Amino acid sequence: MATPKEHIEEIRRKMFFIGSEVINPLTKMVHRAVELLSAELYTKDVHFLMELIQNAEDNEYLEGVDPSLEFVITSRDITGTGAPATLLIFNNEKGFSAKHIESICDVGNSTKKGNRKSGYIGEKGIGFKSVFLISAQPYIFSNGYHIKFTEEPCPHCNLGYIVPDWVNEKPSLSDIQKLYGSGSKDLPTTTFVLPLKPDKVKPVKQQLSSVHPEVLLFLSKIKRLSVREDNEDPLQNTVSAIAINSETNFVTRKNIDAESYTLHLAVNGDRNNKECNYYMWRQRFPVKQENKVERRMDVEEWVITLAFPNGERLRRGATSPGIYAFLPTEMVTNFPFIIQADFLLASSRENILLDNKWNQGILSCVSSAFVNALISLVKMTEGAPVSSLPPMFRFLPVDSSSYSQLNKDVRELIRAKLIEEDIVPSESCMVQKFFHKLHNVGRLMPRFWNILKKAKVEGVSLRNLSHHGLHVLNSSFDGEEYDPVLNFLGVAPVNSEWYAKCIQSSNLVLGVSEEVYYELLVFLAENWSSKFCNTNIGGIPLIKYVDVDGNVALCSINASGQYDMVRLSPQLSWLTACNKEFRCAANCFFMPESTYVALLLCYQTEVVLQWLKNWVKVATVTVYDYAAVLIKHLKNDRKLAVVFAYFLYHSLSKRYLSSREVEILCGLMPLVDNYGAVSRNGNGVLVPANGSKWAELIVSNPWRQEGYIELGEDYLRPGNFAGQRTTGEQIIEFLKSHVGASDIPHLSPPNAWIPAVSAPLTKQNTFLLLDWVKNLKFRGFGIPTKFLACIKEGSWLKITMNGSPVGYRPPSQSFFLTSSLGNILKNGSMLVDIPLVDQNFYGESIINYKEELKTIGVMFEYREACKFIGKYLMSRAASSHVTKDNVFSILNFIRFLREKFLSPDSFIESIKEGSWLKTSHGYRSPVTSVLHDQE
């Protein structure tokens, strides 16, 4: 067997006639063919990288070797060609065989030709020759071969590109080893050394720095690819180093047509380290006869692989390719998954040929592969909670591609196929997962989802969510972040009536906390006009109120709006308790205080209050508003009328009502009289007889004829109103102040004869009567004539005569004199006893009532006493003759008064007309008699 060097010499001699005198007749044609292919086939410098990666993937590797490909660029001129930079490519393949060497020394005679079934991805047979775009003299070191090729025609055969030349000196393997790495790190089997053309250094560095991390994604052999720069001064390094590692973790599903597995890509670079897992779906489809082409006549199956990145895709640069033909094209599909297949490429390798029937056949199968992959991801992952499934739907091609053909053959077909699949998860309270067709599932508004989630936490069962004519999209899927996906699938919101059915069949009102209930009200308020005002929600009992027994009950929005049932109030707690006492007489109910507090403390308070006011007719009332309505519904209910007085009393004491408001309400308040009748009109009000002063003094009720209402004893009973203890005295005092309920001494006396004063009065009643008179005088009220007359003439005032109690006299016949004057009159008048008010009996307090005593006829003046004595004597004279002794007593009394320097005029005036003086002509008055002086 020939040595590698001998083999090269043989090629030069046999293929290119070097050393022979015969000229190869095909020299010019072959040279022109090679030059055209290298110059025109690829339009971008990067293509040489793809061709070399493709070649490395097609190479054969020893068992146990992890195939790798390494790119090292250096500014060292190890070739001695004067190149500004050199690129070295290391590949740990088996190495070049004689057959491979002969292949690259030819055009269109690849060793892989016709071997698509064997997994080869190259097909043009000129992969290595693309290096001439960047290097005028590439070198190959492999399995003992040390050869180079030149771009310039060989001087011996006038051919370039394909004529091998043996390398004798530079670069040496030791030079290469130093760049690769010294020590135990052996050189890989195959090394390419490419001294770069001066104008290609920058583009090559740029492309090396832009090697896409996903380049290994669909390569079955290459597991590691790296790029680095090696210069004597590391500061001169401008290429971003990168090391890409690929690892297939495990196969999750495999059958006749398809298999799925997870592939892990890890990238280590100068700036950061990143990694990403890709869910890979590979499926086989039979090649349709109408899609066959000459270049793929031997291929019977399309193998389509879809890559779904689990997380952020690995990238370098602004865009990521969406279509691979084993290696990336430059087609950015705008789809969130990557399509790999054996596409036919344009000569530039930038794009696939969209108008090619082979490619069209592949694209027509992508939708089926995608749907099967999605079903596998969503439905076949055992033990995965439903909440982990929605992210899988992010792989849907929601956004349109810039390629209309891809929209038609991939995007729209995926959507059409998914419509027929039970693929969308519904909400379920069970471990079992349920999937449904797109049109059988509906979305909920986000705020209602929040309500349902909180209700579930609080123990409300949601098992019937999908019992209302439509399955509910799973809550983990029904979020704003999935709007684009759901819109793409056409998953529509549930209709407004669904909410009515859900609320009605779920315990979302009484079974949740006030905070959650309030959120439900906010939800309804915000959407009422636009969604719910014409639905059956209006007829569902969902407005809370406190019923007649104090329990929380429900009424519908329609009922509340029609009958104005439910109310709110700043004094809600008080009015709720009062309403229970009144047995909800006004058909008025209040929201629970806890609901009202939640309303005031939470967000959107004004929105809910306006909704309650405008649509539910829930008015906010004051205590006065409530009382004004309630008073119209008391009717003739005796108990409610009394309770209303208690209500006003406590509302005033709590300052829920002003004094002015109480005065107005008391003017309208019905009163219960002593017969138990309810009256609304009266000329005056008497306190109840029991315990009253008027009943103690007068006994019977003389005011009844004047239209007064005598309050019943119901008002005297102590009671417990709305948790407030109340005595009868407190209520009576309230009625005195605000209804005008009166008692002596504040009561206006009747113009009638009072039987009680015709007999002696107790000391207490005497002062009560005097206080009455004093109050009347103080208020400037006149005393009715009959009432005053009966007081003056009634014998009820206790008197004394000659210092001894002698009984009772009318005030008009009684005196209230000073003690000295009384003694003078008593001593001077032996004929008459003067009736004096018994001060010992009444005590010193009687002195404080002089004016009142004068008003009712009691005499206080000296001259009044003189007149009284004179009148008394004259009355006796009228009935019988005055004795001689009596006459001298009268005369002595006059003398006595004068001696005491008291005027006797009043006394004389009262007796001078009386016929009591005996004359020669009988008894005559002093003014008609003559005293004859015997002297």
Image (cartoon, grey):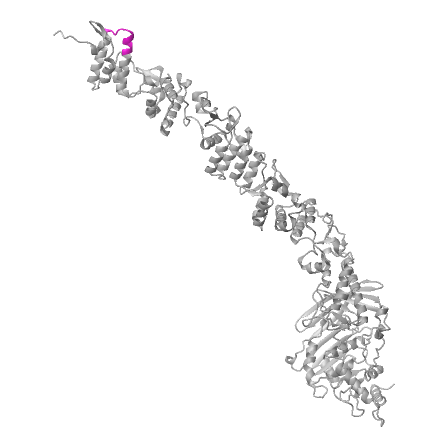
Relative to 370, does residue 136 appear above or below in the rendering?
below
Residue 712 sits above or below residue 662 on the image: above
Q: Residue furthest front?
A: 534
How far across and how far down the image is residue 757, in percent? 40, 18
Q: Does 744 sit left or right of 342 as displayed?
A: left
758 shown above or below 274: above
Asked if residue 850 is among those painted magenta in the image, a careful observer would answer: no
Name the spot of residue 629 as percent of width and height, x first: 54, 37
Question: Is 883 contained in the magenta span?
Answer: yes
| Most foreground residue, 21 or 65 | 21
Q: Main secondary structure of the magenta part?
A: helix
**Residue interval drawn in magenta:** 874-884
Q: Quadrant of the N terminus?
A: bottom right
Tell me which corner region of the image, top left, top right, bottom left or bottom right, holds residue 438: bottom right
Q: Nearer the viewer, residue 264 or 465?
A: 465
**Is residue 146 visible to the viewer in this orientation of the structure?**
no
Instruction: Answer with left or right where residue 272 lies relative to residue 421.
Output: left
Residue occupying the far bottom of the picture: 21
Identified at 56% across, 43% down, the residue is 619
* Location of residue 43 in the rendering, given as x and y in whole percent from the top left corner: 73, 79
656 relative to 195 in the view: left or right: left
The one of 635 and 748 positioned closer to us in this rendering: 635
Where 488 falls versus 169 (above or below)? above
Looking at this view, name the residue that lies furthest to the left: 935
Q: Which quadrant would the C terminus be assigned to in this image? A: top left
The percent coordinates of residue 167 (x first, y second) are: 77, 88
Residue 861 visible, this orientation: yes
Residue visible at 34% across and 26% down in the picture: 848
